[in-house]
Image (cartoon, coloured by chain):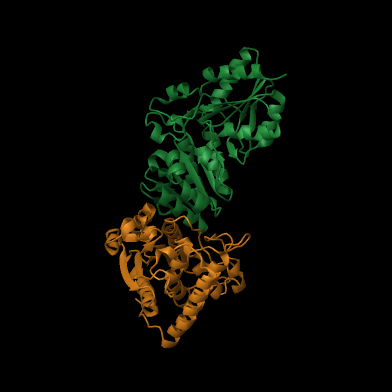
Amino acid sequence: MLTDNKTVSSLRQAYGETLVQLGEENKNIVVLDADLACSTQTIRFQKAFPERFFNMGVAEQDGVCTAAGLAYSGRIAFFSTFAVFASGRAWDQVRCSVAHPNLNVKIVATHGGVTVGEDGASHQALEDISIMRSLPNMRVIIPADSVETRAVIRYVAETKGPFYVRLTRPNMPEIFDAKEYKFEPKARVLVEGKDVTIATYGETVIEALKCAEMLKEKGVSAEVINVPVIKPFDEKTIIESAKKTGAVLTVENHSIIGGLGSTVCETLSEKMPLPVKRIGVRDEFGQSGEYTLLMEKYGLVAEKFINEALELIRSKKY
Amino acid sequence: MKQIKKLSDGEIAELIRLSGKLREKCLEMIHNAKSGHPGGNLSAIDLMLVLYKNVINHCCEWDCSPEWDKRDRFVLSKGHASAALYCVLAECEYFLEDELMSFRRLGTRLQGHPNCNCVPGVEIPSGSLGQGLSMANGIALSLRLDKSNAKVFVMLGDGELQEGQVWEAAMSAAHYKLNNVIAIVDRNRLQIDGCTEDVKAIEPLADKWRAFGWEVLEINGHDFQQIYTAYNEAINLGEATSRPIVIIANTIKGKGVSFMENNAGWHGKATKQEEFIKAVEELRGKC
C-alpha cells in the first residue's frame, strides 16, 4: 500500500478536484467559502458550478450557519476556510447550528497547524482538533496525503452528518498508492513493530515512517499507526498495538492538549494504562517561520522525536 | 403583484380570541416550568399567530405530505420565544396541546430553546442568538436552487441585533438578492439589562437595514390588520424588487399583562402563584 514517497502533491488541490467530481455526480452538493477560495481550492468547484458555490465573504460565522440552512434543506454543504477560523471563529455556530441538529455540513478546513508557516500564531490552528472533537455528533478526520484526501472527501460526502476535515498547507509526499488505497474510518498499522507504537496523523505520518527506519538501524522495532480519524476514535487498533509494544508515542501538528495525544491517553488510562509520551506543541502559540523550520522547532520531525521514542522504551516496566 | 385584502371583522375577532388563549397558555407553560421568558413571548406571539393562521402555506402533517416541500418556512431566531412558537404550533395541530405543559421538563421534546430534531414544525434550532438569519438565508438559497416560490420568514429579537453575525447575514441576503427572505424584528425595545438604547443602541434601525440593502416596513406588532397587511406587502415587495424585506414590528414586552408590560425584569423569570393568577385574570378580562 505504501509508495516510495517520491511524488509530492497538494492536499488542497486534491480536495478541489474531488469536489468537482462530486459536484458532477451529485447536484445536491453545494460549496461555501469565506474569501479564501483560491487558498482552499474550492475555486475549482466555483468555476465548474457557479450556481452552487457561495462566497460568504470574510464572515465565517454567517458562512457556517448558511451552510447549515442549506444542509437542513437537503443539500450536502461543504464549508471551507482556514482551520483557525473554521474551528475557533465559528465554534458556537458549529456547535449550535451544525453539531446539535446533526446537519449534513462538511467543514473542510485548510492550513491546519504550525505548517501554515510565515503567517504566524494568529493563523496557526493548534487547538482545532481539540475543540471540534469535544462536540457531540462531530467527526474529525485529518488525511496524510493527497491520496488519502481524495478518499476522505468522498467518504464525508457520502456519509450523513457533520464532519471536520483538516488539510495541511504544504505539498506532501504521496505515502499511499492511489491504486490500492481504500479509506476506512479507522486507524491503520503502516509498519508493524514490537518495541514502541508511534501513533500519528497528517503531515507527521511521513516523519513517523522515517523515525521507524532510523530506529530499525538502532535495532529497535517501532510500530507506526496512521490515525486519520480522531473521532470516532478507533480504540481497538491502538489498544491492540499498545498491548504488543507496551508504550505509545503520539506525534501531531497540534497542541498536546486535546488532540490525538489526549485521545490516546483517555483510551489507554481507562482501558490499559501504560506509558504514553505526547509530541506536539506544548501549550504555547506558534510563530512565523519557514514551515520546515517550525516543524523542527516544535519537535515534529523524526530526528527530534526519535529520542523521545528511545526514552519511552527505556521507561517501560517489564 | 397580488391585491392585498383586509382581514374581515370575523377573522380579527378570531385572532383576538386566540391571542388571549395562547398568551394564557404561554404563561401557564412558563409558570409550570418555573422558568422561561414571559416578556419576549408576549411581545412576539401576535406576529407568529397571524403568520401561521392567515399568511403562510404550511401543513401540520410533518414530513409526510406531498405539499410539505412547498411550505413556507418560519425560522425563530430569538429562540427564547419558544413557548409562543410551541403554542402556535399546537394550535395549528402539529402536536397535541396536552404536550405543552411538558415544556422545559426532563425528557420533553419542548426544550427551553427549540431543537428542530424533535419538535414537529420547528424548522431550525435556536437559542444562541444571532444565527437564525444566516440559516434562513441558507434555506432561501436552497429554495432558489429548487426554483421554489416558498418564502422564508425569520423572527429576530431587537437585542439580538447587537450580535455581529446578524449584520453579516443581512449583507449576505442583500448580496444574493434573497427576495424570498422576510425578516421580522420584534422591536419591544427591552433586553435583559434594560432598554436597548441604554445597553447598546441599535437605532436608527430602519436606516441600518436600508443601508444594508433591505426593504423596510414598520408596523404596530399588536395590530392584526397591520401585521397581516405587512406580511402580504413584504411578499409583494420581494417579488417586485429582488431585495430582502424586514418588518420592524413595534411591540410591547409583556403585552397583555399590566405588570409585565414594558418591564425588562420580566425578560426571563417565571410568575409566582399570585402573579400568575392575576395575569390570567387580566388576560381573560381583555378577551
The answer to whether one can see residue B29 in this image is yes
Residue B119, relative to residue A83: is it above or below?
below
Question: Which quadrant does the C terminus of chain A fall into?
Answer: top right
Chain colored orange: B
Percent across and percent down for residue B284 are 49, 81
The quadrant in which residue B246 appears is bottom left
Percent across and percent down for residue A259 are 55, 34
Residue B111, relative to residue B25: is it above or below?
above
Residue B143, relative to residue A249: is it above or below?
below
The residue located at (58%, 51%) in the rendering is: A160
Percent across and percent down for residue B132 are 44, 58
The residue located at (48%, 75%) in the rendering is: B279
Between A234 and B283, the residue placed more toward the observer is B283
Question: Which quadrant does the N terminus of chain A fall into?
Answer: top right
Q: Colour of chain A?
A: green
Between A194 and A259, the residue placed more toward the observer is A259
* Label total for image: 0
